[in-house]
Structure formats: structure tokens, C-alpha cells
Image (cartoon, rainbow, N blue to C red):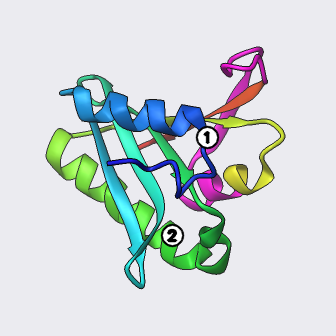
Amino acid sequence: MDLRWIYKNEDDVVERTENVIRSDNAHAHTIVKFGKPIAVVGGDLLWKGVAQIWSVSSPEIEKYPVFYTRTSRMFLRLYHDLFGIRRYQCAVRCDFKSGQRWAEALGFTSEGIMRGYGPDGADHFLYARVI
């Protein structure tokens, strides 16, 4: 399936999606509103009890932030129930304020800055939620 139309042809989104499809340790959930995909939320099992989560979204989520956050919470609960996750973590670009608000709305707290972490060398915050 070609997902580029959802995400403005961002190559990293296509790469992330293809990696999930090929991996036994990665899972993803497409968030759909009125029959249209608005985001993908996923997780990679790093080891027993620990998962790196991520989300890639279209501009449509700006219209449905509560729906997006509630559905993301459901994904986290499902992931916990299926895999016994005790720690979730995610990387959020330091200049991506709405991503930081999303992580905090899900109960994550910042553990610090990962300098030069992104594929483009951008700094990211490491957010975590420990259950």
C-alpha cells in the first residue's frame, strides 16, 4: 500500500511503514476518522517490557486532537495488555511543540535531550512513561 499521499510524500514515513511491515517486533495502528486515515501510531519492542512508540500524522489531526489522543491511549493499553510493557519511550523533535504536547497528554515526561539524534541531525527530547 502506498501511504505517501497521506503524509505529503515524506520518505521517512514510507520507510517507517515498510519497516513495520517487515518486522516481527513492530506493530502499528492506523487511526481513521470518517473513513480517512489521519495518523499511524506504532511501537517497536526493544526488549521485554520496553517499547519505543512513534506516530506519524497528517494535518487532519489538528481537527481531531482529542480523538487522536484517546485512540493513541487505546493503542498503549493494548500494547501493555499484549506485551506487558512497563516502559514506553518516544523521541520528539525539540522544535515540534505539538508532538511534545501529545506525548505529555499521554502521560510521558521528558528525560532529556538527545543531541543530533534525528536522521537530519536534529535534537530530540527523550520522553518516557513508566507504568
Residue 44 seen in the current view: no
Image-based side of 54 in relation to 95, left or right? left
The amino acid type found where label 1 is placed reads Glu
Q: For the point 72% across and 29% down, which residue is it?
A: 124
Q: For the point 31% across and 48% down, which residue is it?
A: 1
Classify 10 Å Cα crowding around label 1: few (below 14), some (14-19), many (20 and above).
few
Front one among 79 and 58: 58
Residue 79 seen in the current view: yes
Spot occupied by residue 76 in the image (x, y as percentages of width and height): 35, 53
> Which badge, 1 or 2, comes first in the chain's sequence?
1
Residue wearing tag 1: 10
Image-based side of 6 in relation to 124, left or right? left
Among the 4 quarters of the image, the one containing residue 43? top left
Q: Kindly report which numbered mark, 1 or 2, lies closer to the viewer in this rendering.
A: 1
Residue wearing tag 2: 68
Among the 4 quarters of the image, the one containing residue 105? bottom right
Q: CA distance from mark 1 to mark 2?
A: 20 Å
Spot occupied by residue 79 in the image (x, y as percentages of width and height): 26, 48
Q: Is residue 103 above or below residue 17?
A: below
Q: Bounds of the magenta span?
A: 101-122
The amino acid type found where label 2 is placed reads Tyr
